[in-house]
């Protein structure tokens, strides 16, 4: 995207105006929004000061904090930004925090000079650079003098990123509240998942990554899959979602899964079906090996690496698999294959009704049109998934 194009700049301005529209005719609404922002600013400032342990001393290596507030997929996507910054700052100490247990350790734990934080009792003021990264990047603190002295090559990156973040203004005030708005805007403009992350981070991010996550044959052996031909599948639910009678809109209907299992077993009786998932995922009796709720996050890369292929909806596992040799069949519904798909995968779009991500606050759990199941994922047929799988299975 050309971020300096007049049409893009005008559309950003329009997006900024959206945040103020609800309060234009109400002083009470405007006051409430102002109070909410002021309270958050004051409380965060107080927390950061109370948690402060001390800024780096003169001569110490630079300290960088990556705060990744999203889910597994968001953290996996942010890994490219961490790698880009580390290439500029090879001597710096990087600290990474993600709220979901094990995610940061899986993605960053094996990297040199990277420390995974298990709790959020840190202060951005203790770092030379502290930032939040999800759909976009937001700087929380910068120690400019230290970068000028120790890493002048990184200064243009910081300057580009700060200018980009200033151009978005209040849209970065609270990433938790505005992340979906920014994502929807980027999707409507024809952008891709990494465009806004690269723009607000001040660096180019490749659409294809050469990074790999460590995998262990011992973990595959642990689950009795050593030397076994198998594919993995994931129902599309996660620990971050509360699953009751209503399935998440991104989840492929259970009846479609069962249709696929029958077709697959008839054509590939020698390949085992291994189901992955969190403890709240539904269990399918057709799975030859059910690992639902039985694996740690750290074990997932090894299990995916040992698989001949992976079948999933657009979930965190698919974004983790971008760093692994396995190829995936990905069923898209409310989320967009164009926006979120990886070139190495078979990306199956959910039809004309799909692509409604971020339209409503609960789009991942409820169809914006009130339909159940969501018609976008339901329209992808089992024969279509089997045909896509056959295209990526190793011969």
Image: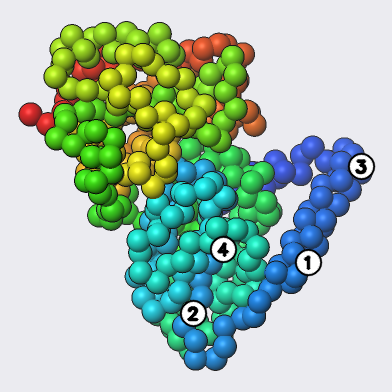
Image depth: mark 3 or mark 2 in front? 2
Q: Earlier in the sequence, mark 1 or mark 4?
A: 1
Q: How many marks?
A: 4
In which quadrant will I find the C terminus?
A: top left
Of the residues under marks 1 and 2, which one precedes in the sequence? 1
Asked if the residues shown at circle 3 and circle 4 are in contact, with their CB atoms under 8 angstroms apart, the answer is no
Q: On screen, 26 above or below 244? A: below
Residue placed under numbered mark 1 in the picture: 46
| Mark drawn on residue 28 | 3
Q: Which labelled disc corresponds to residue 62?
A: 2
Density class for disc 3 (Cα within 10 Å; few <14, some 14-19, many ≥20) is: few
| First along the sequence among labels 3 and 1 | 3
Task: Give the labeled residue for mark 4.
Answer: 131
Whether tag 3 and tag 2 are in contact, CB under 8 A, the answer is no
Mark pair 3, 2: CA separation: 45 Å
Residue that lies at the very extreme toward the left in this rendered image: 395
Query: Looking at the image, which is closer to me, 255 or 183?
Result: 255
Q: Please name the residue shown 51% across and 71% down the image.
A: 64
Residue 150 falls in image quadrant: bottom left
Q: Secondary structure at mark 3?
A: helix
Dot placed on the residue nearer the N-terminal end, 3 or 2: 3
Residue under the image location 12 percent in, 31 percent down: 394
Can see residue 205? yes
Q: Position of residue 80 (x, y in %)?
A: 38, 56
Residue 280: x and y, percent? Answer: 52, 26
Who is closer to the viewer here, 73 or 221? Answer: 221
């Amino acid at each position: 995207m050309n971020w300096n194009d007049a049409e893009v700049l005008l559309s950003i301005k329009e997006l900024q105006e959206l945040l103020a529209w609800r309060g234009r005719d109400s002083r009470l609404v405007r006051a409430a929004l102002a109070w909410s922002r002021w309270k958050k600013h004051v409380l965060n400032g107080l927390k950061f000061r109370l948690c402060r342990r001390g800024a780096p001393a003169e001569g110490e290596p630079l300290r960088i904090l990556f705060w990744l507030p999203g889910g597994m997929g968001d953290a996996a996507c942010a890994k490219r930004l961490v790698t880009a910054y580390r290439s500029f700052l090879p001597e710096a100490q990087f600290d990474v925090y993600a709220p979901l247990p094990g995610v940061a350790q899986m993605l960053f734990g094996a990297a040199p000079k990277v420390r995974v934080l298990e709790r959020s009792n840190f202060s951005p003021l203790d770092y030379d650079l502290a930032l939040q990264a999800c759909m976009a990047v937001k700087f929380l603190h910068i120690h400019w003098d230290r970068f000028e002295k120790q890493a002048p090559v990184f200064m243009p990156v910081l300057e580009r990123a700060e200018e980009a973040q200033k151009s978005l203004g209040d849209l970065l005030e609270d990433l938790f509240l505005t992340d979906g708005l920014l994502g929807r805007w980027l999707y409507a403009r024809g952008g891709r998942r990494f465009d806004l992350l690269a723009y607000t981070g001040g660096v180019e991010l490749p659409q294809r990554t050469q990074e790999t996550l460590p995998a262990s044959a011992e973990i595959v052996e642990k689950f009795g899959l050593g030397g076994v031909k198998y594919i993995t599948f994931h129902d599309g639910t996660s620990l971050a979602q509360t699953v009751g009678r209503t399935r998440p809109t991104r989840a492929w209907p259970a009846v479609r899964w069962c249709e696929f299992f029958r077709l697959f077993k008839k054509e590939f009786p020698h390949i085992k079906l291994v189901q992955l998932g969190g403890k709240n995922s539904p269990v399918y009796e057709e799975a030859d090996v059910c690992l639902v709720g039985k694996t740690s996050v750290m074990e997932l890369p090894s299990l995916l690496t040992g698989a001949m292929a992976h079948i999933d909806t657009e979930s965190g596992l698919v974004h983790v698999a971008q760093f692994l040799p396995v190829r995936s069949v990905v069923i898209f519904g409310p989320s967009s294959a164009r926006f979120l798909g990886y070139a190495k995968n078979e990306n199956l779009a959910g039809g004309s009704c799909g692509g409604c991500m971020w339209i409503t606050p609960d789009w991942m759990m409820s169809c914006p049109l009130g339909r159940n199941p969501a018609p976008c994922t339901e329209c992808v047929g089992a024969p279509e998934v089997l045909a896509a799988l056959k295209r990526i299975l190793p011969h």
